Image (cartoon, helix red, strand yellow):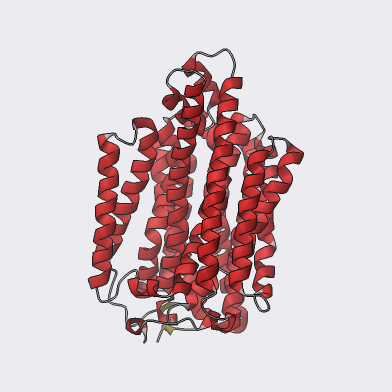
Amino acid sequence: MTLMTRTGPAGRWLVLLSVCLAAMTMPLSFTGPAVALSRIAADLGGSPIELNWVTNAFMLTFGAGLMAAGALADNHGRKRIFLAGLAAYSLAALGCMLAPGVVWFDFFRALQGVGGAAAFAGGASALAQEFDGQSRLRAFSFLGTSFGIGLAFGPVASGLLIDAFGWRAIFLLVAVLGVAAAALGLRTVAESRDPDATGLDWAGAATFTIALAALTCGVLQAPQSGWANPLVIALLGVAAIFFAAFVIVERRVRRPMLDLTLFRFPRFVGVQFLAAAPAYAFVVLLVLLPIRFIGIEGMSEIKAGQLMICLSGPLLILPLLAGQAARRIAPATICGVGLLAAAAGLVWLSCVPVADNALLLPLVLVGIGIALPCGLMDGPAVSVVPKERAGMAVGIFNTTRVASEGVALAIVMAALSGFTATQLGAQGLASPAEAAQLLATGNISETVQHLHLADASALVQAYETAFDRLLIVLATITVLTAVVVFFGLRRGSPSQQDVAPVPACLEG
């Protein structure tokens, strides 16, 4: 039984508004810096690895902190964690705005991820207490749509802010929105917690965080040092050891941060694969395409932002429509078809030149493919466990989603650097690995100077070929994920969407 004071019907929708406003800022926190990366590099400097951490520092701490934040919300109060997270998130955004160098900038980005994890986990688990049944599914569909709004308008809003006021204005906007969400939440969100909570699973939180951090660091270091480098091998070894330790810890503690018995249920496994699917089919493009459009192709930030709307615009409408369609069409079918459409869009994108008219349709197709399952993700993630442990459910699902995004981005950046290095080596250019690292951050002018070239045409050609090859790899992964999601989610009728099986150890 959850301890809480429920708000009235009108108050519940104000709670939803507060949480959705907070959620809307999260996409801004990784799409905005991606659009601004070339400006940030020009102002703050930094090596390719340090510039990669501009995005990865946020996504790593956000993903690693979600499960712990969900457990803290269940233990110490969802409202308390929501407001504390928003405070840390907004202050860290201001720290990014005022950072004197790239190292300090990356440090504040990491803190921003920690605050964002607490705010999102606390807010989403509070929503699960306010709404029941179909209204809960509808509320979480609005939450997904809020992400879509942030994704759709984040790149173009960032481009306009950069053009008018400089890149630091992005973080001022994030801080202002965070403060507004906190002010509304302070007045409307009712406090609630799980009375049976036994405290945070510190051992689980520590082992998972160390494992994820080591894996991300190893993958980011590999393109520069090589996969056989002792440091890279050591980091990947540490990641493997601590992931194994995390599994052992979670199997032994009484109230685990991640209940591993849930993975016995195909539907739960399908939901987790669904959570990870956008990482490779969509989120990496939110970072890589602005870098390519601005740094490699020479577009303005505003033009790049306008093109990105084609990719993310479908998330404004389709998640809600998919939620309505799920009453008549099996969610497994909607999600499977959506992911296959996204894969087709990725293949199409690899076949067209970087020209406005050629890019529009494949970008829209990828966006449609990802938007269809987005409206069906959050509700099943919460309903798979008892209401009292909604914080854990939110933590598991969103840790899978965001941790997959952080790891995927690190792996994809490493793969892009590797493919580019191969292309540069085939052209007989010296130091292809170092040049590929610079190109991966969109710093084409410094790459030209590094290689002592007269012009950048060879570099652009190598990068474009490598990028197209990467898109085919991403499409293949997306097709395989679609198969797993379809067969996982179809185990159970749509009517079971709200009453998924619950392990005995979780029954209240």
Task: Give the quarter of the image for residue 479.
Answer: bottom right
Determine the residue located farthest toward the right in the rendered image: 357
| Residue 310 in sight from this viewpoint | no
Task: Give the quarter of the image for residue 224.
Answer: top left
Query: Can you give x and y, in whole percent of width and height, for residue 124 in the image?
Result: 49, 69
The residue depicted at 68 percent of the width and 35 percent of the height is 354
In the picture, the quarter occupied by the C terminus is bottom left
Drawn side of residue 306 relative to residue 485, left or right: right
Task: Give the vertical position of 31 relative to 275 (above or below).
Answer: above
As rendered, which of 62 and 204 lies closer to the eye?
A: 204
As rendered, which of 364 and 40 lies closer to the eye?
A: 364
Query: Can you give x and y, in whole percent of width and height, for residue 500 in the image?
Result: 48, 81
Number of on-image labels: 0
Task: Give the vertical position of 221 relative to 490 (above or below).
Answer: above
Query: Can you give x and y, in whole percent of width and height, for residue 399 in the image?
Result: 42, 61
| Residue 311 in sight from this viewpoint | yes
Drawn side of residue 339 relative to residue 354, left or right: left
As rendered, which of 303 and 265 lies closer to the eye?
A: 265
Drawn side of residue 60 relative to residue 22, left or right: left
The residue depicted at 42 percent of the width and 75 percent of the height is 265
The residue depicted at 58 percent of the width and 76 percent of the height is 137
As rendered, which of 77 and 218 lies closer to the eye?
A: 218
Query: Can you give x and y, in whole percent of width and height, for residue 232 in the image?
Result: 30, 39
In the picture, the quarter occupied by the N terminus is bottom left
Task: Give the vertical position of 357 relative to 375 (above or below).
Answer: above
